[in-house]
Image: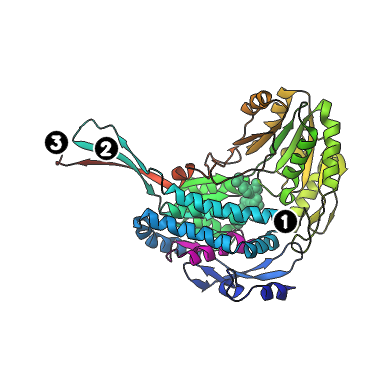
Amino acid sequence: MQATLTDKLAKDTLLDPSVWERRYFDGAWKLAPVTIPVREPATGIELGVAGGGTAELAVELTERAAQAQPKWAETPPDDRARILRQAARVIEDNSQEIMSWIIRETGGVSAKAGYEVAMAAGELYHSAALLTQPIGQILPSADPERMSLARRVPVGVVSVITPWNVPLVLSMRSVAPALALGNAVVLKPDPQTPICGGFLLARIFEEAGLPPGLLAVLPGGAEVGEALVTAPVVRLVTFTGSSAVGRRVGELAGRNLKKVSLELGGNSPMLVLDDCDLDAASSAGAWGSFLHQGQVCMATSRHIVLRSVADAYLQKLAARAAALPVGDPFRNEVAIGPLINEKQLKRVHGIVTDSVAAGADLVTGGTHDGLFYKPTVLGNVAAKTRAFQEEIFGPVAPVTIAEDDDHAIELANQTGYGLAAAVQTGSVERGLRVARKLKAGMVHINDQTIADHPGIPMGGMGQSGNGARFGSTTNLDEFTEWQWVTVSGKPARYPF
Ligand code: NAD
């Protein structure tokens, strides 16, 4: 089967393994000190062997990036924007090949791969467009002869650390604006997705004509990640991943006085009120809980349903879950692919088993065939159970009954997370009233919880982040620093 992939890729394709195998990227492809097998979770087939890094190499790459960055910062914005737009075109021209890699390396279905491709290109176009925005302010000055202004300057070297679940988008949403705004980047993808989260970006920017030295890609685990946080020349760390690791990254960054952007876990609720369209709500709920096997930070992780419609909602949701085809997303038309690994499988199953033991009803699912976990619906889930309290990151929809709107809001706000939320209701006024009281960075009325776009301020509250935002003009705040400048035609005179 491994031969199939290699055969399929003609010599001059974007991700020809002969370019990246056993290598890392720092403007050129170099033999790596360690190797990382890349496996397809659906089959266990080895797709290739990526190069990986050490802590020492990570620090070295940040230093090389620091040397290349000043010239890039001086490159005219139109020239930088042109490279970003060209990178978007490279994605569009190679979308089928990229989608195949996303499907195979992450186990996601083709709709999810298509979303990643479109969204990554969108991140590049939006980042190019950032360079049309004002980059400073003229400030009031006490002296009319002295001009006072504030301007944005690049931070310098940015470390980007990303997870495996939506690897292309989560890497691109940092790399594209960081580069656009004149920074150099060292990217560390998760070792389970070194291609789609790392080498793919290297190839895209290589093809787009990014000057060497501005983007380095070094796959690796915690050791490489920590080195990229503490490396002396790094000014900004953007981290996407779990809240537990985010806390560690935040501590290290704080101790070393780095700016840090943390986009972390979620446990996002969808409130189903008694005046909603139950058919539409259950469809949204199924999409929100089961898309990419629930391995999405914004997944609909808790369905909080008013008592009078709870039975009907549960039945509709369970029927939708039971009808979803599960299997290998590269070779079959399925809705649900494999979980990423055994550890995740054990965790998901452990949460389901513990929650049922604690009194939840197993309405459908709860079994698995290897890494393929059946879409699972749990009814009667009490707020104290693991399925309610923890981020599951699997295809599990826990349904909890609420007595009224206030009780639903109280339940929704009960976990420490605050990434996304949704409200299903027939009344926009009621939806807005409820939404105002939800602790979440993103709220959707009459939709589920998973939504993103390069033009919105993506991010969470509480344990879902540290207030940083990706996307839209918030990228200007994340990827630049302010510099106050005063200019006077005459030298200033002092009594000393
Ligand atoms: P993780 O925290 O285990 O790993 C994320 C990245 O951090 C990986 O590249 C990993 O190698 C690296 N890492 C691990 N230990 C490190 C350390 N000590 N120092 C520096 N880097 C280290 O997360 P995961 O399990 O790969 O991803 C799933 C999690 O990511 C979920 O909690 C999910 O909600 C979250 N997530 C959040 C968002 C968001 O935008 N808020 C998006 C996607 C995923």
Looking at the rendered image, the quarter that the N terminus falls into is bottom right
> Which kind of residue does numbered mark 2 sit on?
Ser
Is label 3 in contact with label 2 (beta carbons under 8 Å)? no
Q: Secondary structure at mark 3?
A: loop
User: Is 1 drawn above or below residue 56 in the view shown?
Assistant: below
67 displayed left or right of 451: left
119 displayed left or right of 414: left
In the foreground, 332 or 408: 332
Q: What distance separates the C-alpha of mark 3 from that of mark 1?
A: 70 Å
The residue carrying mark 2 is: 148
Residue in view at x 80 percent, y 49 percent: 349
Using the image, tell me which numbered label, if any, was put on residue 109. 1
Residues shaded magenta: 189-217
In the foreground, 428 or 50: 428
Q: Nearer the viewer, mark 1 or mark 2?
A: 1
Viewer can see residue 365: no
